Image: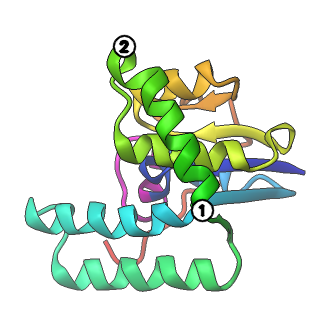
Amino acid sequence: MSKYFLDTSAIVKRYHQEFGSDFIDRLFTESDTEFVISDISIIEFYSVLSLKVRVGEIDEENFMSLRKLFSKDIKRGLYEVAEFTNAEKMESTKLLLKYAKKHSLKTLDAMQLSVVKSVNQPEVKAVVCADEKFCKIIALEGFSVINPIRDFSENSLPSTKKINRPFL
């Protein structure tokens, strides 16, 4: 069983065609795979989609369709949703003190990383993240990292058909 923790930057690529989406699509076709996200990612996902509306990448109809599709995927159990609890709040503070000054760790990234750390680390094959600065910090914490933009390789995952995004 392979378990991947998906950062919001990777989740969005599942629902909106952009550079790195093909890699994410192929990752979802691997057999015997589980995907973990944080409950914070749900909030961030809506924020990212809202930004895409503001800058004209998607319209309101696409926003609503993608939001509903993501919600359905959560409800049907495509993702294991890990919670940001008081323990993760304390860990986020420690991470900020450790990495914010030298590595520019942002608040939401510290929160995400604290949730990653709360998931049983040996079970997580890799953290999937498309933010290069954040990828470096995740690696410093001892996790394998996959960047769907940087690490995309035709030979890195089994060949599959492209997944159509019906709403775009």
Residue at the outermost left position = 55
Q: Is residue 55 magenta?
A: no
Amino acid bearing label 1:
Thr
- Taking the view exactly as shown, the residue that stands out farthest to the top is 102
- For label 2, the residue is 102
> Circle 1 sits on which residue?
85
Mark linked to residue 3: none
Looking at the picture, the colour scheme in use is rainbow
Q: Amino acid at mark 2?
A: Lys
Q: Residues within 10 Å of mark 2 (few under 14, many from 20)?
A: few
Mark closest to the chain's N terminus, 2 or 1:
1
Residue for point 31% across, 71% down: 168
Q: Secondary structure at mark 2?
A: helix
Instruction: Farthest residue to the right: give it.
Output: 1
Separation of residues labelled 2 and 1 (CA atoms): 26 Å
Report whether residue 23 is seen.
Answer: no
Image quadrant of residue 78? bottom right
Bounds of the magenta segment = 12-21
Residue occupying image coordinates x 18% and y 61% = 51
